[in-house]
Amino acid sequence: MDTLELTAEKVEANEKTVVSGSVAVLEAFLAEGANIIFGYPGGAIMPIYDALYDYRDRLHHVLVRHEQGAIHAAQGFARTSGKTGVVFATSGPGATNLVTGLADAMIDSTPLVCITGQVFAHLLGTDAFQETDVINITTPVTKWNYQVTDATEIPSVLAKAFYIAGSGRPGPVLIDITKNAQLQKFDYDGYKRCDHIRSYRPKPIIRKEFVERAAKLINEAQKPFVIFGQGVILGKAEKEFKKFIEKAGIPAAWTILGLSALPTDHPLNMGMLGMHGNYGPNLLTNECDVLIAVGMRFDDRVTGRLDKYAKQAKVIHLDIDPAEIDKNVKTTVPVWGDCKETLPMLTDLLEQKVYPQWLEKFRDCRDQEEETCIDQELHPLTGQITMGEVINTLNELTGGEAVIVTDVGQHQMVACRYARFKESKSNVTSGGLGTMGFALPAAIGAKFGAQHRTVVAVIGDGGFQMTLQELGTIMQSEVNVKIIILNNQFLGMVRQWQELFHERRYSFVDITSPDFVMVAKGYRISGQRVDDRVNLRNALQAMLDHPSAYLLEVMVGKENNVFPMVPQGCSVSEIRLK
Amino acid sequence: MKQEFTITVYTENQIGLLNRIAILFSRRKINIESLNTSPSEVEGIHRFTIVINETEEVVKKLARQIEKQVDVLKAYFNTGEEIVWQELALYKVSTDEIAEKVKVERLLREYGARAVVIRKDYTVFETTGHRQETDRLVEVLEPFGLIEFVRSGRVAIIKASSGFHEKLKEFEQTEPGEELVENEYLDKRDEVFTM
C-alpha cells in the first residue's frame, strides 16, 4: 500500500483507506504493471486525469492527438511488449473514436484495457452532453465490457478486466466509468489480482487422446506441412514451436500475424501464406497429406476458396479458442489448448524425421517465384524504385533486428513478404481488420513496448494521411520512430485490383499528397525524400543513424503490382505469379 | 438442412448480456424465432432459451460463439425430440361472441383453453402447449373476431440433462475437472462428422 501514501486519506479510527474511484483505477494499473498509458483527456474522464497528476512519477501518460491514435499505440505496445496495452478516453466522441482500434484488437487478439469516462450515472439515457451508449456500441468488438457506476466495484472490475484481456485468447476489454464513480470516495481494501472467473475458461482442457491421434497422423505423414499464426507468439511458445518443427522436420509457413515467430532464415521457414504469400506455401497446401495449423484461424485471405482448400489433407488444428475449431476448415484432429503446453506434448510423441524430397518441392517453387517476381522486385536495374528494394535494403542495414510496423495495402504485403526477422514480436501490422492509418500510432506504441529496439514504420501515402496527426505525439513525447513512406501516388492495392479485375477503371484511387517532408518539418521531425535508386541506401542509413524520429519519403513505381496473388474467390492452387 | 433447434444457455445475471448474445445471431443474419430468459435451477444463474431454424453445422458454431462469451457458463443445443417444451398463449375475444355462439365455447374446450379474465366486453383465454396447437386455435378463433393474440417465448427442459448444480461446482473450481469438457459431442465425433 506504499504507493497510496501520496493521495489516500487514511482514516485513523478504523484503519481503513479511503480513496476515490479514480485513484483506485490508477492503483489497479500500478498493480498490473500497466505503467504506460496512451490517452486523451476530456470532460467525463477529468477526475481520473486529476488523480493521474499525482501519479506522474509512476505512470507514464502519452498524450496522443486522436483517440484512435491512442488505441493503435496501445496495440503496438502490446504487440512488441507482450503485455496488456492501456488507454484512457473520454465519453461520447472520445469513446466512439476507439471503435476502430477495438475492432482491430478484437480480430487480431490484442490484449487491451480501455477506460472510458462516462457522464454522471443520473444522466445516463438522458442524451446528456457527450453521452453515448459506449457499452452497446462496443459489445461486438470487445472480449468483455462493463459499465461502472459505483466506485466500490472498481478494484474487482479492473482485476477482471486485466485477467480477461490477457488470458486465453487475448482481446480488448472496455470499462466505462461514470463520472460520479470516478469522484466517489470509498473504503479501499487494496487491489487483488483476478485469476479465476467461474463462467470463463481461458484455457480448454488438453485432451491427451487427441494429442496422441495428432502425433500418429504426423508420424505416418509423407508430406506434412505446418502453418502457423499469432497463437505461437501470444502463447510465448516460439521455442516450443521451433523444437516441434525441427524434430519432425516439417516445413512451415506463416500468416502475417505469425510472422517473426520463427526466424526468417530458419531452414524450415517456407514463407508466407495467403493472397500475396509465397508460391510454394500456397500451392503445396493443396498437395500436403497432413496440414498442421498452429494458433491460426484460417482467415479467408489465407485459405482462398474454402471448398478447394486442402481437401486432400488430414487437418490437425491446435488452438486455444474452441470456437475456432471447425469454424472455417473441418479438422480431422482438434488439439485444444495453449500451444505452449500442447506443442511439447506433441513433440514428445513425434519421430525424428526429414523430408528431403518434400522440401525440394518448396525449393523448386521458391526458385520459380524468385525468377518470376522476387528478383525484379528486390533487384530492379531500371525504372523507378520498387517497394521490395526499399525493404531489402532496410534488411541489410538493420540485419533483421528492427521492429517493422506496417499499415495496410501494397506496402504491407511487400514488407511482410520481404522483411527479415531474427526475433519474435518484431512484426506489427493490422491483419484481420486491415486498418489504414494503423501504422503511425502503432509504431509509437511499439517503440514504448520495445524501447531498446529500432522501430521502423512502413506506410503508404494513403494510410499515412489517415493518422498523420500523430506526428504531434512523436514530437511532444520524443518518440524515436523511423517512418518510411512508400509513395506510389495511388491507393495502390485498390488500384491493383481495379487494374486486374475492373478493366483499369481507376475510380478514385489517384490520391494527392502534401509535401510529407515539409509536414514532418512542421512537427520538428527531420526527413528527406528519395526518388533515385542511387541515393536509397544512404538515405535509409541516414534515417537509421538519426538520433531521433525521422521521416523518409521514397517515391516508388506508380503502377507496380504485388505478386504472387491468389485472386479473390480462387483456390490457393490458382496462385498467379504474374 | 435447416431444422428447428432449441438453444439453452446458462449465464451469469449480467446487464448487457442479452445484447451480447443477441448480436451473435443478428451479425450472422439469423432470425431468433423465440427467446426467453428466466432464472434456472441454480440460484443466481440465468437461463436463456432460444429457438432458431438453422442447419446443425451453423447451430454448432453458434453455440461455441455463445459459450465463448465471458459471462456465459454453458450453451447446449437440441432438436425438438430431445426436449420437453411449452409455450403460453393469450387470446382476447369478445364476450358477446362467446355467449352467442356455442361453437366458440366448444372450440375453447377442445383446445384446453382456460379463461383468465371474464369481463362484460371481453374474455381472455390462455393455452399452453406446442406452437402448432396455439397457432391452430388462432386460426379457428379468427372468424369469430379475435381481438388480441400474444404468445410467449419457448421454455424447454432438456430430457437428458441432470441439471446445472453439479456442473456449476466444476466451474467454480479454479482448475476444471475432467467432467468439464467443452463441447461434449466431441466424444462422439466419428458419429457426428463425416469427412
Image: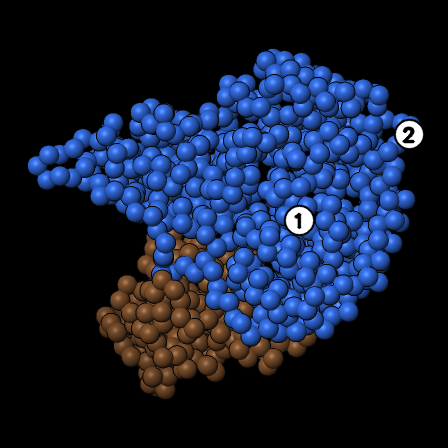
Chain colours: A blue, B brown
Residue density around tag 2, few if under 14, some if 14–19, many if 20 or more, within 10 Å: few
Q: Kindly identify the residue that appears in the image at 72 percent across and 39 percent down.
A: A420
Q: Quadrant of the C terminus of chain A?
A: top right
Residue A55 versus residue B139 in the image, above or below = above
Provide residue B185's location: percent of width, then percent of height.
52, 75
Front in this rendered view, residue B64 or B5: B64
Q: Kindly identify the residue that appears in the image at 36 percent across and 29 percent down.
A: A58
Provide residue B176's location: percent of width, then percent of height.
40, 67
Residue A461 versus residue B171 in the image, above or below = above
Among numbered discs 2 and 1, the one appearing first in the sequence:
1
Q: In which quarter of the image is the N terminus of chain A?
A: top left
- Which dot, 2 or 1, sits closer to the camera? 1
**Is disc 1 placed on a helix, strand or loop?**
loop
Q: Mark 1 lies on which chain?
A: A
Mark 2, residue position: A381
Find residue A320 and name its label: none
Residue A53 visible to an observer of this rendering: yes
User: In terms of image quadrants, where is residue A151?
Assistant: top left
Q: Name the amino acid type tagged 2.
A: Leu
Mark 1, residue position: A262
Q: Kindly identify the residue that appears in the image at 42 percent across and 51 percent down.
A: A164
**Is disc 2 placed on a helix, strand or loop?**
loop
Provide residue A81's location: percent of width, then percent of height.
52, 39
Front in this rendered view, residue A170 or B68: A170
Same subunit, tags 2 and 1:
yes
